[in-house]
Amino acid sequence: MTKIFRTAGDLGDSLYAMAVVKHLGGGIIAFEAANYTRVRLTPEKWKCIVPLLRAQPYISDVVEWTGQHVDVNLNDFRAVMIKALRRGMGKDRSLISWMLEAHQISQGVQSQPWLTVEPNKVARVVFNRTGPGRPAQ
């Protein structure tokens, strides 16, 4: 039986969550346009990563969440993370670390690849200048 995984928030949140999806055997990704996240993940936003997600051997489909049953709510990490942060703990932890903890998965999973792509050699060297606090261009 195929599992359905629900995710919301920034695209980065959803990409990090794929480590959990892969570890739990994969299935269908259901994107939620939630009002409780910093960025509402509308279809216009998440459709740009559908080809990447469908290229993963553990993802069978990518759909919009419209209230259907889910087997794994990838958003559960927020409750664990917010609770700890309010107590002043875990400020130095990564997002994937919180996700793995929320789903009782070994932290060692984050050192294993969870996204693969066919190379598209466009240059000898490619620089990525994104990061926290950098404005989108």
Image (cartoon, grey):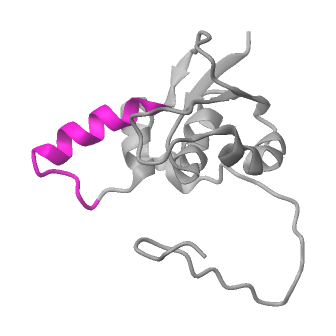
Q: The C terminus appears in which quarter of the rendering? A: bottom right
**Where residue 89 sits: x, y (%)?**
15, 50
* Left or right of 126, for residue 51: right
Residue 106: horizontal and vertical position, in percent?
Answer: 43, 39
* Image label count: 0
Q: What residue is rendered at 40% in x and 74% in y?
A: 133
Residues 35 and 86: in front is 35
Check residue 83 for magenta coloring.
yes
**Quadrant assignment for the N terminus:** top right
- Vertical comparison of 27 with 71: above or below: below
Q: Quadrant of residue 103?
A: top left
Image position of 81 with respect to 104: above or below: below
Is 21 included in the stretch rendered in magenta?
no
Q: Which residue corresponds to the image point at 27% horizontal and 61% vertical from the top-left?
A: 92
Residue most extreme to the bottom: 124
In the image, residue 51 lies at what x, y percent?
Answer: 83, 47
Q: Nearer the viewer, residue 99 or 69?
A: 69
x then y, percent, for residue 117 = 82, 57
Q: Main secondary structure of the magenta part?
A: helix
When the figure is inspected, residue 104 is found, relative to residue 37, above or below; the finding is above
Q: Nearer the viewer, residue 12 or 113?
A: 12
Residue at 24% from the left image edge and 41% from the top image edge: 82
Tell me the magenta residue range. Answer: 75-92
* Left or right of residue 130: residue 126: right
The residue positioned 43% from the left and 39% from the top of the image is 100
* Residue furthest to the left: 87
- Position of residue 23 relative to residue 132, above or below, is above
Q: Is residue 95 left or right of residue 89?
A: right
